[in-house]
Amino acid sequence: MKTLGNILWIIFGGLLWAIGLFITGIFLCCSIIFIPVGIQYFKLAGFVFCPFGKTVEKIDNNVLKKIINFLWAVLLGWESALMMLLTGAILCITIIGIPFGKQYFKMAKFVLLPLGRKFLKESK
């Protein structure tokens, strides 16, 4: 089921989101303060490419990561998270789109506060 979900995900928008997040990561790495966020966006692009069968786990943050997360959330992160939430809500209107909407909700948390999270494969 995960493989079929990932194939449908790529066809119906996952590839475009992954490319967009990768390009965003490149632009973020051009600034000095948001290089860690850019690196996390590269990881997120890989996650967005095939999200089914993966989870996002929160790990401990130091003070610097919390400050960068706050700056990111206030400046640009809220816009990205809002777009993910809206996309997820639109997909949840139909029964077929609910699993895809859940994936967007999962990604919205990461996009808002990207530092201090890591990706794991779900255990069977």
Image (cartoon, rainbow, N blue to C red):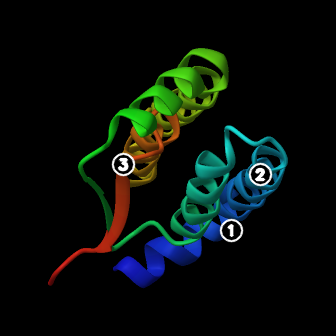
Three-letter amino acid code at disc 2?
Answer: Cys
Circle 1 residues within 10 Å: few <14, some 14–19, many ≥20: few
Query: Is the Cβ of the residue at disc 2 closer than 8 Å to that at disc 1?
Result: no
Of the numbered discs 3 and 2, the one sitting upstream in the chain is 2
Taking the image as shown, residue 42 lies to the left or right of residue 43, namely right
Quadrant for the N terminus in the image: bottom left
- At mark 1, the secondary structure is helix
Quadrant for the C terminus in the image: bottom left
Mark sitting on residue 116: 3
Q: Position of residue 85 (x, y in %)?
A: 49, 29
* Cα gap from disc 2 to disc 1, whole angstroms: 28 Å
Q: Position of residue 110 (x, y in %)?
A: 44, 43
Residue located at (68% from left, 38% from top): 33
Q: Nearer the viewer, mark 3 or mark 1?
A: 3
Three-letter amino acid code at disc 1?
Answer: Ile
Of the numbered discs 3 and 1, the one sitting upstream in the chain is 1
Closest to the observer: 72 or 16? 72
Taking the image as shown, residue 31 lies to the left or right of residue 123, namely right
Mark sitting on residue 11: 1
Residue 5, quarter of the rendered image: bottom left
- At mark 3, the secondary structure is loop
Closest to the observer: 34 or 27? 34
Residue located at (25% from left, 53% from top): 59
Three-letter amino acid code at disc 3?
Answer: Gly
Name of the residue lying farthest toward the left = 124
Residue 54, quarter of the rendered image: bottom left
Relative height, residue 52 to residue 70 (above, below): below
* Cα gap from disc 3 to disc 2, whole angstroms: 17 Å
Closest to the observer: 45 or 68? 68
Relative height, residue 32 to residue 48 (above, below): above
Mark sitting on residue 29: 2
Residue located at (62% from left, 54% from top): 41
